[in-house]
Image (cartoon, helix red, strand yellow):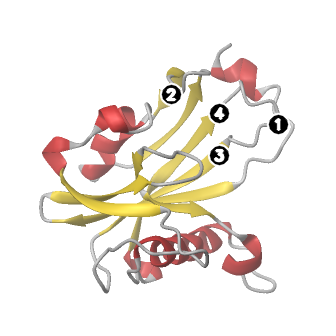
Amino acid sequence: MNLSEYKATIAREILPRTSAFLLRSDQVCLGLKKRGFGKGYYLGIGGKVEKEIDSFAGDTDKMMMVRRGACREIREEVGVTVKLEDLQFMGSLNFYFPHVPDESWNEEVYIFTVNKWAGEPIAQKDQNGEVEIEPEWVPLTQLPFDKMWDDARYWLPLILKDRKVNGEFLFDENLLVVDHYLI
């Protein structure tokens, strides 16, 4: 099955997510996922955009809601404060997992880079005392692609060189990319 064929079968709305990459000199802050979806992978800092929390009454600007969600997720996951205007939008990527029958893994991810924030990234405990993300500064020349989602090798180097991206990725049951496009 290719991207076009799978997309024609989707019945469920794809919900927005965020992924942000904090940058300083020649390093990027990646998060090692300790639990939940993506456990064991390094990824950007982010997560679900929560309409009830990230939008205001009468607010119809989806991108503003996404930006608020990104700032909230960064604060919740690594304890730093990012202003809306300090999020540099780098593009959006859709991820599809046809082997998941309820389509719950499919996601539309808004990608940001951040060069300015308040605080130092440290792991945050949730209300149950558990850590979801362990932040780690990684040299830009030593990205751990072997410990990241398979798609990252296609687009992460581009955004870290300040190039905007948009694309879609189709994964197989082994979580490997089997079809994609990237512009």
Compute the Cα span from label 1 to label 3. Answer: 13 Å
Compute the Cα span from label 2 to label 1. Answer: 24 Å
Compute the Cα span from label 4 to label 2. Answer: 12 Å
Q: Could you tell whether 31 is left or right of 53 in the image?
A: left
Disc nearer the start of the sequence (3/4): 4
Taking depth in this image into account, of 108 and 136 the one nearest to the observer is: 136
Disc nearer the start of the sequence (2/1): 1
**Mark 4, other Cα within 10 Å: few <14 / some 14–19 / many ≥20:** many
Q: Which residue is mark 2?
A: 181
Disc 1 element: loop
Comparing marks 1 and 4, which lies closer to the viewer? 1
**Amino acid type of the residue tagged 1 in the rendering:** Asp
Taking depth in this image into account, of 13 and 119 the one nearest to the observer is: 119
Q: Which residue is mark 4?
A: 96
Q: Which residue is mark 3?
A: 107
User: Residue 120: x, y in percent?
Assistant: 28, 79
Disc nearer the start of the sequence (4/2): 4
Comparing marks 3 and 2, which lies closer to the viewer? 3
Q: Residue furthest top?
A: 1
